Image (spheres, grey):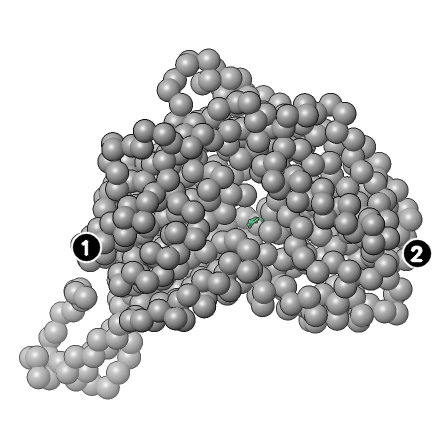
Amino acid sequence: PQQLAEQIASLQKAGAELPHAAPSTLAGNIQASPTEVRNPANRAELVGYVSMATREDIALAFDKAGQARKAWDDAGATHRAVCLVAAADGLRTHRAELVRLLVKEAGKTLPDAIAEVREAEDFCRYYAAQAREHFADPLALPGPTGEENKLFLRGRGVFACISPWNFPLAIFLGQVTAALVAGNSVVAKPAEATPLVAALAVRLLHEAGVPKDVLHFVPASGKLFGEVAFKHPALGGVCFTGSTGTAQFINRALAARDGAIVPLIAETGGINAMIVDSSALLEQVADDVLTSAFTSAGQRCSALRLLFVQEEVADRLVELIAGGMDQLHIGDPSAPATDVGPVINAGAASKLDEYSQRVQQKGIKLLKQCSLNQVRTEGSYFAPRMLELSDARQLTSEEFGPILHVVRFKREKLSDVLAAIREAGYGLTLGVHTRIESVWQEIVAEAAVGNIYINRNMIGAVVGVQPFGGEGLSGTGPKAGGPHYLFRFATERTLTVNTVATGGNAKLLSLGS
Ligand code: UN1
């Protein structure tokens, strides 16, 4: 972090022109009055500009992507994988600029930004390897003598990729590269708050050999994008990460569509819990709670929201967590020592404030609130806090920030804890801290949750190691960064040839669409 902090400072001093994200269909024809992108840590600092796509820009992007998709699909998975690996190399080369944009545009701390660039690179390399393994050659299937059967994986058409501001590089690129390498063309919509780092990612993919008409970039409002994208005849699928409500909206829009039936791959929210029993190592638990609840200012869909603590150890654990909260460095995310930076914008900060005040008026107890003394008031900061609920059912919404809710439970009521988690309907991440193996096994057997972490923190899923994604209200699967993800972006074609009729030596090298 220290080294990158210095590189970032020198990049800024160079006085380079501010980045300008614009719809790729405009090709130089940038709007005269673009929107300013400002640093959430210091709203006075201008980071760059964005020109938003019009309805026509979005439609044109889909038209062009629709025309370009067959040649890209026909080029084969090996070629596409080579492009992804070249893009991974490009990410590495441009790491300092990507980190700088993640810090300045998204308010990411340096460790978060560095990890995110690495994750983006991991997605490129992992999906390239998966595509080489499964997409390059058709799968020969056994059949009777005189018959040849092959299964081909092909792209579905144009994928609309809609990504969130909390991982504006890794999730953005993860979606886009999965869709591309499976043989689709892509129209990618970055989050409105974070177009700059996504625009740079698209540039790197183009430089890596992905044709411009195969990958389009359209900064746009979600509403306008959806109005055009979900009705467009070339649409082959939608990949979305964001709120549960928006995923449900997209589902309805796709259901109402005339024409081809297209899949939705959605990764959405969670009200993620951690269960701590009295056998747990409390110092370790406290450390893992602080990491899980407050890293990235709690703006991860994997973040811990609801901490269930067995009552015998609750006071001690709360004390340890509160002590740890006193030690958090909250402030400028470009400072190497900062643990918690700002939230994404002023609106997010005030929404969290309103929530916190509203629940306290309803009698929910504030156990601890970090001090924001050191933080400049013009930034979009929200002080991490710990609230105590008398019943887990008091938390009904995903509050996307550094707010931890603690609930005490009696050992003999563990099944009620599991019932409360199940009833909420989400199933993204779950943490368990216990040194009794049968306890965590019982919890694992009952939990309908995508990512379960035993005796460790519950964020930071590693590509290819901890495939990430949830169930129920938390998403459709398959899991990003997992071995089954690419298949959902593809269509399968089975080819059966009567080899007797074709001379007995049919050579099926490729299958056109
Ligand atoms: C998200 O926050 O939108 O495991 C999902 C993690 C990350 C979460 C990404 N992969 O913390």
Q: Would residue 154 be found to the left or right of residue 43 on screen?
A: left
Nearest the camera: 264 or 311?
264
Nearest the camera: 359 or 132?
359
Q: Residues within 10 Å of mark 1 (few under 14, many from 20)?
A: some
Q: Does the image show residue 184?
A: yes
Amino acid identity at mark 2: Glu
Q: Where does residue 280 sit, x and y in percent of width and height? A: 83, 53
Q: Where does residue 26 sit, x and y in percent of width and height? A: 26, 38
Q: Would residue 412 be found to the left or right of residue 347 on screen?
A: right
**Mark 2 residue element:** helix
Locate the C terminus and report the quarter of the image it occupies. Answer: bottom left
Rendering quarter of residue 239: bottom left
Q: Residue at x 57, y 50 (%)?
A: 461
Q: Nearer the viewer, mark 1 or mark 2?
A: 1
* Labels in figure, total: 2
Q: Residue at x 29, y 32 (%)?
A: 30
Q: Would residue 402 be found to the left or right of residue 361 on screen?
A: left
Q: Where does residue 347 sit, x and y in percent of width and height? A: 60, 40
Q: Residue at x 67, y 50 (%)?
A: 399
Amino acid identity at mark 1: Gln
**Which residue position is annotated with label 2?**
312
Q: Residue at x 86, y 53 (%)?
A: 363
Q: Would residue 507 be found to the left or right of residue 448 on screen?
A: left
Q: Does the image show residue 155?
A: no
Q: CA distance from mark 1 to mark 2?
A: 65 Å
